[in-house]
């Protein structure tokens, strides 16, 4: 059924999207989104959804407001379910009411889903409470950019200046001089604390504090630009005590994540938790095999194996998809013992009801071999479900140890379709400080997409290279680079922690 949903996207942190908004994004045929809506929110959309960018920022409108209104009406009339994703809250200086008025006039069904407004979220992330019993018992939200068609300001500057309310100005950077001058002229003390919060709740958040008298010249000196909120009131003085978000160790640091998109979530989550600005640049594409005949034959003879060794989470996932397609489950492994190369693979097996018999202390094939030798692998039949192309050391050394080994490809890895221009541009802009590699394949594919000579100008003065372990680091050395960051434990959490420690 055709309908338009006005969704509040929140202030920038994708974690602040409401459950209702996420639910609608996942179902919508068409998503019309703003400049201030986090790009990460589009991950919730259907793969076949029509995505239309109508970004609006100061002085640069991709589409005018009336055209946006007409677009919503047109899409709904064509029978589509439309999600209109707006930064912050649709009805708090978001012009959402204007869009709804046109929908009502056109007889279009609609629903409004409130979002977390930046007026509440950005000060909170900056350590500024909008109310406090000792300082302020009320809050006033004010636009710093009124309708240019008005002949005079609608603001009662005297009432604003002389109240005890915390004042929050939206879109006020361009008119910062006039806003602060009007407040002082209307009777506000020049020493009243003031703060600007730019890109609030995002990894780029910046806060500038001062007084109502000097915040404008301080902003010019610092090159402080939109989008930013202006907060005026005694509560700003609590920032030194209550600030928390800007103490995150990787805040503002750009980190490139080269893992396959299916595997990247754990590393992204850890880095973002520490404040990093993550650039997803998956260099590996993972896909199922078109012909699973060999895997199915291995499944049919599972009862003959003494060991089944998994070397990746993807190996577990794709092997189980074949099991389940044949109407089987974990019981099909029967008497076979199970090994996992590391804790992530072990957790994937545990999700299938299997507690691995072997997880080596060091999470590389060499340690798996040592652990299996200690178990007495000689004379055992071993199945290794893995990628179509992988290191041969594990099967080779197990055969040398006297085992009978069957290597069965269960999925395929290939070069991801990526354009390195955006990453290089971000490096040119000084926005990237780290590139992470979690396997030799991510290194090899990265340099197929971005030749080594294009990376050399940035490394190591601006950009550091981080490897999950020594094997990946050795592959990197083959391209003329050294790993600047490498954890002692070869896991994704350890890699994220190593970046935190390097950032100091």
Image (cartoon, rainbow, N blue to C red):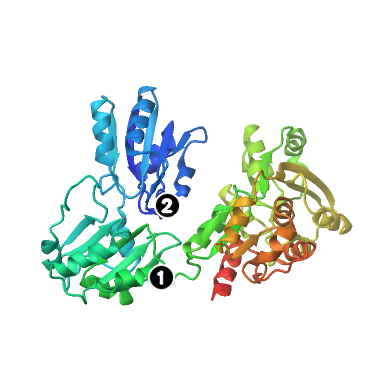
Task: Give the quarter of the image for residue 451.
Answer: bottom right
Between the residue at mark 2 and the residue at mark 1, the CA separation in whole angstroms equals 27 Å
Closest to the observer, 372 or 428: 428
Describe the element under mark 1 as helix, strand or loop.
Answer: helix
What is the crowding at mark 2: few (fewer than 14 residues within 10 Å), some, or many (at least 20)?
A: some
Say left or right for 489 vs 480. left
Check residue 222 in the rendering and tell me which mark sits there, or answer none: 1
Where's residue 355, x and y in %?
A: 61, 54
- Residue assigned mark 2: 14
Compared with residue 255, is residue 71 higher up or lower down, i.e. above or below?
above
* Apparent side of residue 10 relative to residue 398 in the rendered image (left or right): left
Looking at the image, which residue is at 72% across and 41% down? 410
Give the image quarter of residue 4: top left
Q: Nearer the viewer, residue 316 or 126?
A: 126
The picture places residue 187, in percent across and down from the top left corner, at 13, 70
* Residue in the image at 28% along x and 43% along y: 95
Q: Nearer the viewer, residue 264 or 135?
A: 135
Quarter of the image with the C terminus is: bottom right
Image spot of residue 351 (x, y percent) = 56, 49
Q: Which of pointers 2 and 1 lies earlier in the amino acid sequence?
A: 2
Q: Residues within 10 Å of mark 1 (few under 14, many from 20)?
A: few
Evaluate if marks 2 and 1 touch, with contact meaning CB atoms under 8 Å apart. no
Indicate which label's residue lies in the foreground, 2 or 1.
Answer: 1
Determine if residue 281 is in view.
no
Q: Assign a secondary structure to mark 2.
A: helix
Where residue 283 appears, as percent x and y from the top left, is 67, 50
């Amino acid at each position: 059924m055709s309908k338009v949903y006005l969704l509040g996207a929140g202030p920038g942190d994708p974690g602040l999207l409401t459950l209702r908004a996420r639910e609608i994004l996942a179902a919508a045929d068409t998503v019309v989104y703003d400049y201030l809506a986090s790009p990460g929110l589009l991950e919730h959309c259907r793969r076949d959804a029509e995505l239309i960018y109508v970004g609006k920022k100061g002085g640069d409108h991709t589409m005018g407001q009336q055209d946006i209104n007409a677009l919503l009406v047109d899409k709904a009339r064509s029978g589509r379910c439309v999600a209109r994703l707006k930064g912050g809250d649709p009805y708090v200086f978001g012009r959402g009411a204007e869009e709804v008025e046109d929908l009502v006039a056109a007889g279009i069904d609609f629903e409004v889903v409130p979002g977390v407004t930046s007026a509440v979220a950005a000060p909170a992330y900056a350590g500024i409470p909008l109310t406090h019993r000792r300082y302020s018992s009320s809050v006033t939200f004010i636009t710093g950019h009124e309708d240019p068609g008005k002949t005079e300001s609608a603001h009662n500057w005297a009432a604003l200046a002389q109240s005890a309310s915390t004042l929050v100005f939206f879109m006020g950077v361009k008119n910062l001089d006039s806003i602060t001058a009007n407040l002082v002229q209307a009777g506000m003390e020049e020493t009243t604390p003031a703060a600007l919060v730019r890109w609030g709740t995002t990894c780029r958040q910046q806060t500038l504090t001062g007084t109502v008298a000097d915040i404008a010249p301080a902003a010019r000196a610092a090159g402080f630009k939109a989008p930013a909120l202006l907060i005026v009131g005694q509560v700003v003085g609590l920032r030194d005590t209550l600030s928390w978000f800007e103490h995150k160790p990787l805040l503002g640091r750009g980190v490139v994540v080269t893992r396959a998109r299916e595997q990247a979530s754990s590393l992204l989550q850890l880095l973002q938790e520490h404040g990093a600005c993550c650039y997803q640049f998956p260099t590996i594409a993972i896909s199922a095999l078109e012909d699973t005949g060999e895997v199915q034959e291995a499944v049919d003879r599972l009862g003959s194996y003494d060991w089944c060794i998994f070397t990746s989470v993807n190996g577990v996932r794709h092997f189980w998809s074949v099991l389940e397609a044949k109407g089987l489950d974990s019981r099909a492994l029967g008497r076979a013992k199970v090994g996992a190369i590391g804790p992530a693979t072990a957790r994937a097996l545990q999700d299938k009801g299997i507690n691995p018999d072997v997880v080596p202390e060091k999470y590389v094939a060499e340690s798996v071999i040592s652990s299996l030798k200690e178990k007495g692998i000689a004379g055992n039949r071993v199945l290794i479900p893995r990628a179509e192309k992988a290191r041969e050391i594990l099967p080779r050394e197990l055969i040398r140890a006297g085992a009978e080994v069957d290597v069965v490809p269960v999925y395929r890895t290939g070069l991801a379709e990526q354009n390195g221009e955006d990453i290089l541009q971000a490096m040119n802009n000084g926005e990237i400080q780290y590139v992470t590699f979690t396997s030799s394949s991510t290194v090899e594919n990265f340099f197929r997409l971005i030749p080594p000579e294009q990376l050399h100008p940035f490394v190591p003065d601006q950009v550091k290279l981080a490897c999950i372990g020594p094997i990946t680091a050795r592959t990197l050395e083959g391209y003329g680079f050294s790993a600047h960051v490498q954890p002692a434990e070869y896991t994704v959490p350890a890699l994220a922690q190593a970046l935190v420690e390097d950032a100091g």
